[in-house]
Amino acid sequence: MASTDEDALVTLSIICIIYSILIGAGGFYAYKFKESKASLAAGGSASICLLVTSLVTIFLPKRVEAWGVLAVITLGLIVFAGVRWRMFPGDDGQRKFMPMGMLAVVSTVVLLLELIALIIIST
């Protein structure tokens, strides 16, 4: 693997770390302003899992398993956010794009980047 590939993988790892921090911040925000303990627990646990796995990919960028775990967790967040946005409208009966629609879109972008990392590793 060339050093440019490793640089790309480290960059993708940093993007995943930022993503995990945003997931945790979203859960904390929902707890702070909406008093949602479920959001705090879900956001916190997803954030910790993503953060730990992202740190593994920084130190061991060639580990396919770590990138696979990141992809599975991210896919789970996409499914969760998509179903929640589609099935449960807001208090006023309208489907609001924020926050679940945005989570689904951002998670889809991150999943694509994780799949790119897996392609880089396999070539």
Image (cartoon, rainbow, N blue to C red):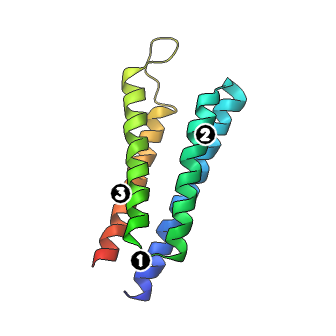
Dot 3 or dot 1: first in sequence order is 1
Q: Are marks 2 and 3 in contact (CB under 8 Å)?
A: no
Against 13, residue 69 (above or below) is: above
Few, some or many C-alpha atoms within 10 Å of disc 1 (few <14, some 14-19, many ≥20)? many
Q: Residue at x 51, y 59 (%)?
A: 16
Q: Which mark is residue 71?
A: none
Kindly report the distance in space between the C-alpha atoms of the residues bearing marks 3 and 1.
17 Å
Q: Please indicate whether residue 79 sits to the left or right of residue 98 in the image.
A: left
Badge 2 is on which residue? 26
Q: Label 1 vs label 2: CA separation? A: 30 Å
What amino acid is labelled 3 in the image? Leu
Outermost residue on the left side: it is 123
Query: Which residue is denoted by mark 1 in the rendering?
Result: 62
How many callouts does the rendering have? 3
Q: Nearer the viewer, mark 3 or mark 1?
A: 1
Badge 2, how many Cα within 10 Å: few under 14, some, many 20+?
many
**Quarter of the image that includes the N terminus:** bottom left
Which is more toward the observer, 53 or 123? 53
**Amino acid residing under circle 2:** Gly
Which residue occupies the extreme right position in the image?
32
Q: Is residue 49 above or below residue 90?
A: below
Determine the CA span between mark 2 and mark 3.
21 Å
Residue that label 3 marks: 112
Identify the image quadrant of residue 122: bottom left
Residue 113 image position (x, y, % from top left):
39, 61
Of marks 1 and 2, which one's residue comes earlier in the chain?
A: 2
Q: Residue 2, relative to residue 24: is it above or below?
A: below
In what element is the residue under mark 3? helix
Residue 84 shows up from this direction: yes
**Which mark's residue is nearer the viewer, 1 or 2?**
1
